[in-house]
Image (spheres, grey):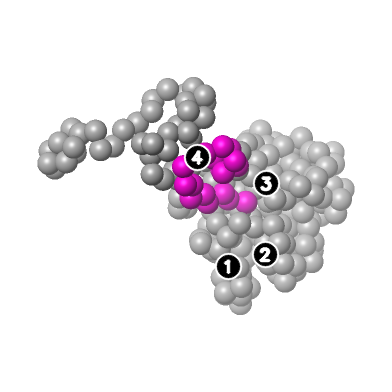
Amino acid sequence: QALSQCGLPAAAVQAIESPDRELVNQLLKLDRYVDMLIPRGGAGLHKLCREQSTIPVITGGIGVCHIYADDSIDFDKALTVIESAKVQRPSACNSLETLLVNQHIADRFLPELSKKMAAAGVTLHASPSAMPYLTGGPANVVAVEEANYNDEWLSNDLNVTLVDDLDAAVAHIREHGTQHSDAILTRSLSNAERFVREVDSSAVYVNASTRFTDGG
């Protein structure tokens, strides 16, 4: 209706309303009718399109997003932001996948994180350094696997690992991130400015949820 009102062909924009995934496989072969595909979804969909499509494909948008909790954080405010980033819509590409926690606050902060995530139904995937502070808490905790750092969970799962300092947090993000959305929680202006300057992501946040933009 909107297209017709603007004098454009009503069939210029179409929607496939069926949730049947087999239709995706059919679409990937319609090179006679479709000039370009831009998949919007997780890594599995992107991989399927790259491998099966007979149509040129532009892929991107996968989000392995991080929050670094600095040693100067306000615990209550930090937990609220972390909950928003992880729980508000776990399947979104800018939801939180890995929480990096400064080792100097681990003994005090991680037990509080466990309570918050347990209430939200989040499973924590803990590094060896973080595990002792989470074991025995109310949240479901399992050991993180190295491959987990490179994948989107798209679910109520969260990697938790300790880092020595801001330098280590930035290094982790550079190694495992996808330049999508990353954030720092801190009361240090100098650390906030360094994080924004050194993390090369499309959206970099200070004391805000990664869910602030994109992802629906």
Residue drawn 36% across the image and 36% down it:
33
Closer to the N terminus: mark 1 or mark 3?
A: 3
- Residue 186 lies left or right of residue 16; in this view the side is right
Closer to the N terminus: mark 1 or mark 2?
A: 2
Q: Give the residue at mark 1.
A: 200
Single out the mark in the foreground, 2 or 4.
Answer: 4
In the rendered image, residue 190, in percent from the top left (x then y), is placed at: 61, 77
What is the distance, in whole Å, between disc 4 and disc 3 at their CAs? 26 Å
Q: Give the residue at mark 3.
A: 151
Figure quadrant of residue 136: top right
- Labelled pair 1, 2 in contact (Cβ < 8 Å): yes
Q: Amino acid at mark 3?
A: Asp
Quarter of the figure that contains the N terminus = top left
In the rendered image, residue 102, in percent from the top left (x then y), is placed at: 75, 62
53 over 184 or under it: above or below: above
Closer to the N terminus: mark 2 or mark 3?
A: 3
Q: Amino acid at mark 4?
A: Thr
Few, some or many residues within 10 Å of mark 4 (<14, 14–19, 20+) = some
Single out the mark in the foreground, 4 or 3.
Answer: 4
In the rendered image, residue 2, in percent from the top left (x then y), is placed at: 18, 37
Residue 174, disc: 2
What is the distance, in whole Å, between disc 1 and disc 3 at their CAs? 18 Å
Closer to the N terminus: mark 2 or mark 4?
A: 4
Q: Secondary structure at mark 2?
A: helix
Q: Give the residue at mark 4.
A: 54
